[in-house]
Image (tube, coloured by chain):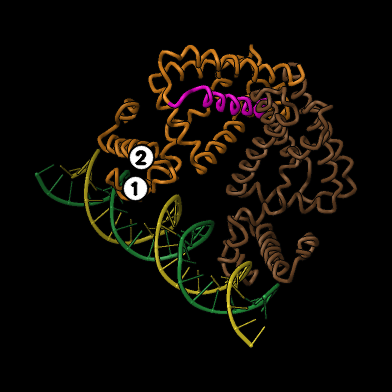
Chain colours: A brown, B orange, C green, D yellow
Amino acid sequence: MIAKLLSMETQGRRERKKLQTRQLISDVATELFMARGFDHVTVADVAKAADVAVQTVFNHFPTKEDLLFDEDAWWLGPVRAIREAGPGAGAVEVLEQYYLDEIRMRLRSEHLVTWKAFARTIEESPALLARRRKNADEMEILMVQALQERDPELGPLQARVIAAQYQAAQKVLEAELARVLPEQPEAGRIAQYEEAMEQAAAVVFGALKHGLRG
Amino acid sequence: MIAKLLSMETQGRRERKKLQTRQLISDVATELFMARGFDHVTVADVAKAADVAVQTVFNHFPTKEDLLFDEDAWWLGPVRAIREAGPGAGAVEVLEQYYLDEIRMRLRSEHLVTWKAFARTIEESPALLARRRKNADEMEILMVQALQERDPELGPLQARVIAAQYQAAQKVLEAELARVLPEQPEAGRIAQYEEAMEQAAAVVFGALKHGLRG
DNA sequence: CTCCAAATTTGTAGTGACTACAACTATGGA
DNA sequence: TCCATAGTTGTAGTCACTACAAATTTGGAG
């Protein structure tokens, strides 16, 4: 009973150990995948490296891909942004602002190098590319719901168009980011990367807001 | 030598038999998938039903999904439309016209019922959904090339935006078509379906051309 | 018609993700 | 101290797919 109150951190050795094991597996897996490439590492390899049974891996992660796409559904960020935004501003403006913030955050993060390597790992694996597409699809569906809850005036078709077009925009900008960032991003050039991405975002979101003919 | 000239139809009993086998496998597979659902039919089932070895199936089709997504890359239609269009009209207009023609064609086809069932089969299978996403991605990449070849003025980012936004539009409209068409489409109501799709297309392409704020 | 070389088909063995399930072990609490 | 339960492990099996060698079919040369 009381334990439930402190649930955030640790609610008993048992749960703690379980989370530890889970984290260990995830970390070991991520390291192996980034080093050798997702498709050249078997789940058995991961299990052996983490010193657990193969079954234990599947007890914690439903699929091999989940070993990498672990951390709390960060790809749903845009949906949260819509949910948290008041009904004041237009949806596209909210999403544009969210994306700009997100990019700046990532570029300034100490994990920038890791992020780039992570992106490359995905790009090199058909299975992970498929998973990324699936995540994008899921995001789009949830965004349609979020948009309609935020503004009941919005028709279903309208909402789907906004969600789909945002997803398209995000995809293009992620690709652009991959182009802009060199293999080993340099801390001294972050301002340059940011400048390039802001320009690209202006073009892409400009097309969303004012149309391809505008 | 001479055989090569008549290559379209039949260039020898050998090739003909091979194509026959291929066609038989594809037909049998499609039937089974539509009847029982893609995920509830194994490749071994298909092989048995077509009275060939499992290996033979894989000799003709690289993956199980290819058994259904067989016929000559119809999903690249929009790319062909761009390639065939003169440099006169704007890209978006070409694509809008293409999509409207395509929809009208499909609605008027004698295979409308089959089309609906086909779409449902895809919708019910995670593996086929993944494949559809992959096809869409492939289409988008080729469209970027086509757009840039057609109009060298067009910057890479611009081209990517157009391709991605068209893909988004198509996705939304395909979903809308699935909603508009009942399980058993009736020939007498084709005009209604068409009307509904034309309206939806106007909304979706309107957003592409004039922006979400327009 | 006969026979060879190439094209196809087939069977065998194996890999790897993933599932079902039963046995085993550690742990929290009575 | 002991038990019910959560978590781990091992075993056996399914299914898509690959590699490869053996068997079969076929087109064409002599």
* Helix, strand or loop under label 2: helix
Q: Is residue A48 visible?
A: no
Kindly report the distance in space between the C-alpha atoms of the residues bearing marks 1 and 2: 9 Å
Write down the residue under mark 1.
Answer: B45
Residue for point 70% across, 27% down: A162
How packed mark 2 is, by other alpha carbons closer than 10 Å (few <14, some 14-19, many 20 or more), is: some
Q: Is residue A6 visible?
A: yes
Describe residue A192's horizontal placement relative to residue B33 as left or right. right
Describe residue C25's horizontal placement relative to residue B69 as left or right. right
Magenta stretch, main secondary structure, is helix
Name the residue type under label 2.
Answer: Leu
Q: Earlier in the sequence, mark 1 or mark 2?
A: 2
Residue for point 42% across, 41% down: B37
Residue B18 image point, x, y percent: 31, 39
From the viewer's perspective, is residue A109 above or below residue A49?
Answer: above
The segment highlighted magenta reads B162-183
How packed mark 1 is, by other alpha carbons closer than 10 Å (few <14, some 14-19, many 20 or more), is: some
Q: Of residues A52 and B138, which is closer to you in this image?
A: A52
Q: Of residues B104 and A127, which is closer to you in this image?
A: B104
Using the rendered view, name the quadrant where residue D5 is placed. bottom right
Could you say which disc has been placed on residue B141 in the image? none
Q: Quadrant of the C terminus of chain B?
A: top right
Q: Are marks 1 and 2 in contact (CB under 8 Å)?
A: yes
Q: Quadrant of the N terminus of chain B?
A: top left
Describe residue A50's horizontal placement relative to residue A111 as left or right. left
Write down the residue under mark 2.
Answer: B32
Using the rendered view, name the quadrant where residue D26 is placed. top left
Residue A59 image point, x, y percent: 59, 62
